[in-house]
Image (cartoon, helix red, strand yellow):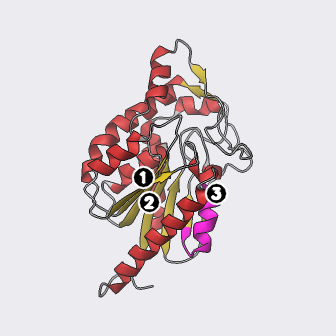
Amino acid sequence: MKQHSVLPGAASFYYQAGSSAVLLCHGFSGTPQSVQEVAAALFEHGYSVYAPLLSGHGTHYTDLEHVTAADWKRDVEKAYEWLASRHERIFIMGQSMGGTLASYLASSAEKAAGMILINAAMEVPCLAEMAEASTSSFIAEGEPDIHDTSQQEIAYLHLPVHAIRELVGLTREVEPMLSSISIPALLFKSAVDHVVPPENTTKIYQSILSEDKTSITLPNSYHVATMDYDKQIIIDHTASFMNRLSTLEQQVPGKGHE
């Protein structure tokens, strides 16, 4: 099998700052480039940020034909363990399928201080229908769903039907896990999303057991919200959310002192 190189700008990255860190997971067919601006801003707020490149991504779309949802889960588990070995406090953050994977981690991660989801996927009817109806191995994906046309995401324009089915299977596996999540949660949903219906976020909000939970609507962004007009809303609310939780933890005797 031919080995494809990682595309320029698509690689994993790690910004090292304080003892609080963010695991930032990109979406299906995308790369860490899609969350880089948000990551850089959180780094400026004093947070370390690790954005891993998920298996089969950031190279050539045919590479996605050879990976499974188990590979993606393993990717984020390893990334979380790596951060947890180096940092006192970990926040789990993800967009689209990255939000699905963040939810998967949050259902069992003992050291997680909070969860931030952006247009997280639990039901993706458009992709599921495409995969069911397809008689070929690959389907055209189209341009990334971004309202701001000046933005260019590094993403595949063709997708293996196998990979779409793996994504759909992942969402169906993770959705029942939502009722196991009790850590503080900050949820973002775009008012208009042509990939993941905004009702996904509503379902997540209603399903998780977190007492500390907030849902924020992004009025002027589409699916890839971290690259869209409302990215500053994401940055500001996420920084405030993590600052508040970090301060609260530091006030507990014997916990979280930096």
Foreground residue among 38 and 19: 38
Q: Position of residue 187 (x, y in %)?
A: 42, 55
Q: Which mark is residue 258?
A: none
- Identified by mark 2, the residue type is Ile
| Residue shown at 40% from the left, 81% from the top | 247
Q: Tell me which numbered mark, 1 or 2, is placed earlier along the sequence.
A: 2
| Residue shown at 40% from the left, 85% from the top | 257
The residue singled out by tag 1 in the image is: 102
| Residue shown at 43% from the left, 28% from the top | 125
Q: Position of residue 83 (x, y in %)?
A: 48, 65
Rendering quarter of residue 41: bottom right
- Is residue 55 visible in the rendered image? The answer is yes
| Residue shown at 56% from the left, 54% from the top | 52
The magenta region covers 35-48
Q: Position of residue 130 (x, y in %)?
A: 50, 21
Q: Which mark is residue 36?
A: 3
Rendering quarter of residue 61: top right
Q: Position of residue 43 (x, y in %)?
A: 60, 70
Give the structural element (helix, strand or loop) at label 3: helix
- Identified by mark 1, the residue type is Ala
Foreground residue among 92 and 163: 92
Cβ atoms under marks 1 and 2 closer than 8 Å: yes
